Image (tube, rainbow, N blue to C red):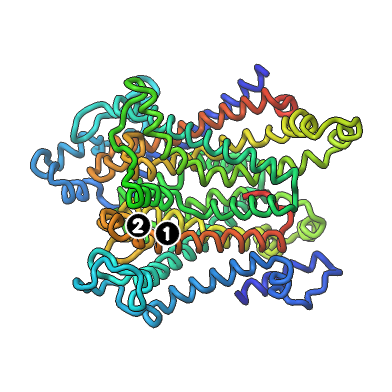
């Protein structure tokens, strides 16, 4: 297991470096003069800062490779992502304040997704080709097509029209009042989790069907075990292992979806931070959030891989 | 569509006994009814987009202050918005933008997937190693976040949205092409071509490409839905194609949002259009995959 962990960690290094280059290049190399755009579109900037000041603040007066190394060594050595252009506060500070909110939203969405998907997926598999299976499958493929921002919009609009109820927009931090905080995030979590549950449901069904065809399941039936025992102890435990990888595959979808959901329900997470920064053209923050999102997804995937290794001995032994 | 047929004819040579005489579309209709209906629905939206001027009862930007915020009626099937613009007409023109962006981004994405996947899969070795790490790194970034960052640098507009989506979805999809190429690479006819001294480019063009056509066609179809969904998300955030161009995403957001409480139909029509198109591409893509490329079943 130890060597497996080491191998995974080592494999992460080149990917992290490439990701940092992707972030850097996307924000800096794209044609179009960022400064012109900033000065022309941001009134705040035009009167308080001159072109030279902005160029110096972004470090754009140095050659590209030097900019990259200054930027990356600041992050690696001091955790320094630069300062917000207009507020002057460190980007790292803002990120650390916003990140937990997005992660909490993501975790709730994931849980909701699993709670919806697993029972239906399992039912669908053990009652394959019945009316129930057919309905569950049609439902999941339909759910997959509903954009989360539309679902979110309807959840805000219709209860308000019908019952005069609307979700609270005053966000309460978890540390202040955990119950109120979870109440805040539950509805957005359900909306975000709905689309993901469709994917998980399909995957659970496929995996269950595959496992149910195995010899050891036939043996379990032949021994005269009850259906509950066969399904829960023999089939489910093996079918759920690949479903764990879905958590990793869905991480980018969750964080990407959170950007929109945070906007609809006004939740002060990373997504809202990114959108605010884009509006103000605050590039250090945009770069910071962009990098943080990528690194977070990679770390989640690493965790998933390690869990997978724990659950399935075949993985850590092979290759 | 006829192009699909031609490719089909090329790729089926591997299955000698399967006679092509009930045509591909007949087979699609008989074996995959839901998928065929999805295909028809997709065609319907495509035609709506192309003939928006002819079908739309009003101009998408025709402001009728007296008719503002009217519910669905015989004159305005989907009602009118806060400026008195006809929602049906705006949905039809919105279909045009969605179709243009969806199809061109998907086409670009498929070409990029094919290029990366074929080179990486066929040559293997160090090139493959490097490309796959790059793909790993790229896949860590959510599509929407990349789009937001690019638009923040380049400003909103159709070319940058299509370019970014094409590149992003293309890199992500290259995995599927690569795995198909890796198995094709070991086939006898490829080895035969190599041993008679055919050049790499000839082998890739004449032997590998035609044999990875089925996954490419499936990729193309499903990417249309992904691209439309991503573009509408971006428009919803106010970063898509700039107004007054009507997009389904922007119709659900912006100034219209405050009026949805008085006119809930404003929230329904664009969302239903989006859901229908994405649903159609999903079921059509699934059906094509099952018919063309059973290996890909279960992967998404």
Foreground residue among A36 and A261:
A261
Badge 2 density bin: few <14, some 14–19, many ≥20, Cα 10 Å: many
Q: Chain of mark 2?
A: B
Horizontal side of A149 relative to A221 (left or right) equals left
User: x, y (%) of residue A173?
Assistant: 33, 26
At 26% from the left and 26% from the top, the residue drawn is: A90
Would you identify the image quadrant in which residue A280 lies?
top left
Residue A264 figure quarter: top left
Q: Relative to B179, is A227 on the left or the right?
A: right
Element marked by disc 2: loop
Give above or below for B238 relative to A75. below
Name the residue beneath numbered marker 2.
B252
Q: Quadrant of residue B161?
A: bottom left
**Can you name the residue that lies furthest to the left here?**
A47
The residue lying at 30 percent from left, 48 percent from top is B152
State the residue at coordinates (46%, 59%).
Answer: B228
Residue A273: x %, y % from top left: 31, 37
Q: Residue furthest bottom?
A: B54
- CA–CA distance in space, label 2 to label 1: 7 Å
* Residue A28 visible in the snapshot: no
Residue drawn at the location 45% of the way across and 67% of the way down: B99
Q: Does residue B151 sit above or below B12 in this rendering?
A: above
Left or right of B105 on screen, residue B203: right
Q: Secondary structure under badge 1?
A: helix
The location of residue B138, given as percent across then percent down, is: 49, 42
Asked whether disc 2 touches disc 1, contact meaning CB atoms under 8 Å apart, the reply is yes
**Mark 1 highlights which residue?**
B271
Q: Residue furthest right?
A: A222
**On the same chain: label 2 and label 1?**
yes
With respect to residue B242, does B10 lie above or below? Answer: below
Q: Residues within 10 Å of mark 1 (few under 14, many from 20)?
A: many
């Amino acid at each position: 297991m130890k060597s497996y962990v080491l191998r995974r960690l080592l494999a992460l290094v080149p990917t992290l470096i490439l990701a940092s280059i992707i972030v850097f290049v996307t924000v800096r190399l794209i044609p179009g003069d960022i400064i012109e755009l900033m000065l022309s579109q941001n009134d705040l900037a035009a009167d308080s800062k001159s072109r030279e000041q902005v160029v110096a603040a972004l470090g754009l007066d140095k050659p590209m490779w030097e900019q990259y190394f200054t930027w990356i060594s600041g992050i690696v050595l001091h955790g320094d992502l630069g300062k917000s252009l207009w507020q002057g506060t460190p980007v790292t500070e803002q990120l650390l304040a916003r990140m937990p909110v997005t992660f909490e939203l993501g975790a709730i969405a994931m849980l909701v997704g699993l709670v919806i998907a697993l029972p239906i997926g399992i039912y669908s598999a053990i009652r394959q080709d019945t009316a129930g299976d057919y309905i569950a499958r049609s439902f999941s493929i339909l759910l997959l097509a509903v954009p989360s921002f539309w679902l979110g919009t309807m959840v805000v609009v219709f209860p308000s029209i019908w019952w005069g109820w609307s979700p609270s927009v005053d966000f309460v931090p978890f540390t202040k009042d955990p119950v109120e905080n979870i109440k805040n995030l539950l509805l957005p979590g359900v909306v975000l989790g709905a689309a993901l549950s469709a994917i998980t449901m399909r995957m659970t069904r496929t995996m269950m069907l595959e496992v149910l065809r195995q010899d050891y399941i036939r043996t379990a039936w032949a021994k005269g075990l009850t259906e509950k025992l066969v399904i829960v102890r023999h089939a489910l435990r093996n079918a759920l292992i690949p479903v764990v990888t879905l958590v990793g595959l869905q991480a980018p979808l969750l964080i990407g979806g959170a950007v929109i959901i945070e906007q609809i329900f006004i939740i002060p997470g990373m997504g809202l931070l990114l959108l605010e920064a884009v509006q103000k053209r605050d590039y250090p923050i945009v770069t910071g959030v962009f990098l943080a999102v990528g690194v977070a997804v990679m770390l989640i995937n690493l965790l998933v891989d390690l869990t997978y290794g724990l659950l399935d001995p075949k993985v850590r032994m092979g290759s | 569509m006829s192009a699909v047929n031609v490719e089909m004819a090329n790729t089926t040579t591997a299955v000698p006994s399967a006679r092509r005489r009930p045509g591909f579309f007949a087979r699609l209709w008989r074996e995959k009814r839901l998928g065929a209906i999805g295909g028809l629905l997709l065609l319907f939206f495509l035609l709506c987009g192309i003939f928006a001027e002819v079908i739309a009862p009003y101009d998408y930007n025709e402001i009728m202050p007296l008719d503002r915020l009217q519910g669905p009626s015989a004159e305005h099937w989907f009602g009118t918005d806060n400026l008195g613009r006809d929602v049906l007409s705006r949905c039809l023109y919105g279909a045009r933008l969605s179709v243009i962006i969806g199809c061109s981004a998907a086409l670009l994405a498929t070409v990029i997937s094919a290029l990366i996947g074929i080179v990486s899969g066929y040559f293997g070795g160090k090139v493959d190693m490097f490309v796959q790490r790059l793909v790993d790194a790229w896949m860590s970034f959510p599509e929407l976040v990349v789009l937001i960052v690019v638009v923040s640098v380049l400003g909103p507009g159709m070319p940058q949205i299509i370019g970014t989506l094409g590149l992003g979805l293309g890199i992500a999809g290259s995995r599927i092409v690569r795995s198909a190429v890796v198995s094709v690479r070991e086939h006898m006819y490829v080895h035969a071509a190599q041993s008679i001294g055919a050049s790499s480019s000839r082998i890739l063009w004449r032997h590998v490409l035609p044999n990875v056509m089925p996954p490419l066609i499936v990729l193309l179809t499903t990417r249309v839905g992904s691209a439309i969904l991503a573009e509408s998300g971006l428009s919803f955030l106010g970063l898509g194609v700039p107004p007054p161009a009507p997009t389904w995403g922007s119709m659900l957001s912006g100034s219209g949002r405050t009026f949805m409480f008085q006119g809930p139909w404003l929230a329904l029509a664009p969302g239903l259009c989006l859901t229908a198109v994405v649903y159609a591409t999903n079921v059509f893509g699934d059906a094509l995959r099952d018919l063309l490329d059973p290996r890909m079943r279960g992967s998404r």
